[in-house]
């Protein structure tokens, strides 16, 4: 800035510099107004609002409005937004038939990648990515249809009839109703579960340029169809180092609970560089202090299990092991030096499990929550005059030029 400013882009072009930065440890790929993280202080803000305040006072739909539009809604705006989201919750009957194409034991994330990608076939010619109104409708469609797609992937795997959305219920209660209800016996959503799930959705709604959001941006930067770009984001989220971690956390906690080895033994394995075992739910690329979401969710986990009493008793040993693991790791130099703290997914799985949600649905719920973050970033990118097609450079380490040899000479 100022009279002596340097045109960095021109300078780089002239000098031919680029950075080699595997995993984008220190390269900003874009500018963004959506979410702020201070990993050292353990701060997370959505559009400037601290996550603790949103978690304590808002609903997931209110947070969706905030992320998409940049500010909190008035009550009229929220009312209109809820109505619009409900309007789009149905799936085309032809989309319904897509589910039949999957094996009965398909992972619901695989179904979700396929079905969300398939939506691009239904909303293609009518999505002009340069038209703000088209982008707005695409955003509403995605936020609205994700609970239906998520719940139906579960129903399909269980061989149960699909439940259609019930527009008399809230966003989160409707999802639970489509998951656990059957047409002959509508599900009465437990208000404690609804609140706990709503909180999980709020905490997972956005997290700036993580792997899946960067995937959505990169694929969308070619002006590809937004439904296809979101499908790419879901694929990226699926991995165990990202959204798949919450499923792995429960498997790890169950293994510890049922093992004759102590929690200390598992911590020792995580430190052993000859053992590929890692403490799932520990560590984060950006948070080098406690993940603020983990604090909120640990409290909710404790409250939920207490509230559930005997119904939640099954999950208490897992929660106790999780607390023990956290205590031991937090006193261990290995974890202290590397600044490895529990992340949001260390406790979220226990809540989901206590609610009766099967393990393979955990990442699906993460995807459902993160859809609003993905689409907010995509929308922001599409209106940023500086944004351009993503095209990372590489450090070539292969052969120099060499001569082609005919096959009989090789
Ligand atoms: N258990 C044991 N050691 C760990 C762990 C862990 N969970 N996480 C990192 N480390 C160690 C690494 O071995 C490495 O040690 P070294 O310096 O001696 O080689 C050091 O800590 C740094 O780890 P990196 O993998 O380089 O850190 P990076 O920032 O690339 O990875 C990640 C972050 C992927 C989250 C990692 O901590 C991890 O694999 N955690 C477990 C999976 C997990 O919980 N993922 C969820 C992420 S949050 C989310 O998606 C919402």
Image: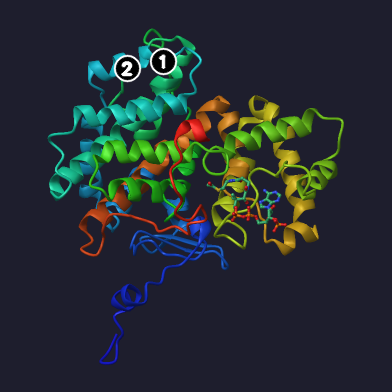
Q: Is residue 247 left or right of residue 101?
A: right
* Quadrant of the rendered image containing residue 17: bottom left
Which colouring convention does the figure follow?
rainbow
Instruction: Determine contact: label 1, label 2, CB under 8 Å.
Output: yes
Coordinates of residue 87 in the picture (x, y in percent): 21, 31
- Residue appearing at x 24%, y 16% in the figure: 94
Q: Quadrant of the N terminus?
A: bottom left
Coordinates of residue 63 in the picture (x, y in percent): 36, 49
Coordinates of residue 325 in the picture (x, y in percent): 75, 46
Q: Is 281 placed above or below 104 here? A: below
Q: Which residue is mark 2?
A: 98
Whether residue 58 is visible here, answered yes or no, is no
Whether residue 149 is visible here, answered yes or no, is yes
- Residue appearing at x 66%, y 55% in the figure: 341
Q: Is 402 placed above or below 33 here? A: above
* Label 1, residues with CA under 10 Å away: few <14, some 14-19, many ≥20: some
Q: Which residue is mark 1?
A: 102
Coordinates of residue 291 in the picture (x, y in percent): 58, 56
Q: Is residue 344 left or right of residue 395?
A: right
Q: Secondary structure at mark 2?
A: helix
- Residue appearing at x 12%, y 36% in the figure: 126
Judging depth in this view, the residue of 134 and 404 nearest the camera is 404
The residue at label 1 has a CB less than 8 Å from ligand 1: no
Mark count: 2
Q: Is residue 374 left or right of residue 379?
A: right
């Amino acid at each position: 800035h100022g009279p002596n400013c340097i045109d960095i882009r021109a300078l780089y072009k002239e000098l031919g510099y680029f950075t080699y930065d595997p995993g984008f440890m220190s390269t900003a790929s874009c500018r963004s107004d959506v979410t702020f993280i201070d990993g050292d202080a353990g701060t997370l803000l959505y559009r400037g609002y601290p996550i603790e305040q949103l978690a304590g006072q808002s609903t997931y739909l209110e947070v969706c409005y905030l992320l998409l539009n940049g500010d909190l809604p008035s009550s009229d705006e929220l009312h209109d937004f809820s109505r619009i989201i409900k309007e789009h919750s149905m799936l085309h009957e032809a989309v319904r038939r897509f589910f039949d194409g999957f094996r009965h034991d398909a992972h619901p994330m695989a179904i979700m990648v396929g079905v969300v990608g398939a939506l691009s076939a239904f909303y293609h010619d009518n999505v002009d990515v340069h038209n703000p109104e088209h982008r707005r409708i695409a955003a509403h469609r995605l936020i609205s249809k994700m609970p239906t797609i998520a719940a139906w992937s579960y129903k399909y795997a269980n061989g149960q009839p699909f439940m259609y959305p019930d527009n008399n219920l809230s966003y989160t209660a409707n999802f639970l109703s489509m998951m656990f209800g059957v047409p002959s016996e509508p599900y009465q959503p437990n208000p404690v579960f609804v609140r706990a799930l709503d909180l999980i959705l709020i905490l997972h709604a956005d997290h700036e340029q993580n792997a899946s959001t960067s995937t959505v941006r990169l694929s969308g930067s070619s002006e590809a169809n937004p439904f296809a770009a979101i499908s790419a984001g879901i694929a990226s989220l699926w991995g165990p180092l990202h959204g798949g971690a919450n499923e792995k956390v429960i498997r790890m906690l169950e293994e510890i609970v049922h093992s004759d080895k102590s929690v200390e033994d598992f911590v020792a394995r995580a430190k052993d560089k000859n053992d590929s075992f890692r403490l799932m739910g520990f560590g984060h690329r950006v948070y080098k202090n406690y993940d603020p979401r983990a604090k909120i969710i640990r409290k909710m986990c404790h409250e939920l299990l207490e509230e559930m009493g005997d119904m939640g008793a099954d999950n208490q040993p897992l929660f106790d092991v999780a607390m023990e693991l956290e205590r031991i790791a937090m006193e261990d130099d290995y974890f202290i030096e590397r600044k490895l703290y529990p992340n949001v997914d260390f406790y979220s799985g226990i809540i989901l499990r206590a609610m009766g949600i099967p393990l393979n649905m955990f990442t699906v719920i993460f995807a459902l929550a993160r859809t609003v973050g993905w689409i907010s970033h995509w929308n922001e990118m599409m209106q940023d005059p500086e944004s351009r097609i993503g095209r990372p450079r590489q450090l070539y380490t292969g052969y120099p030029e060499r001569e082609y040899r005919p096959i009989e000479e090789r």
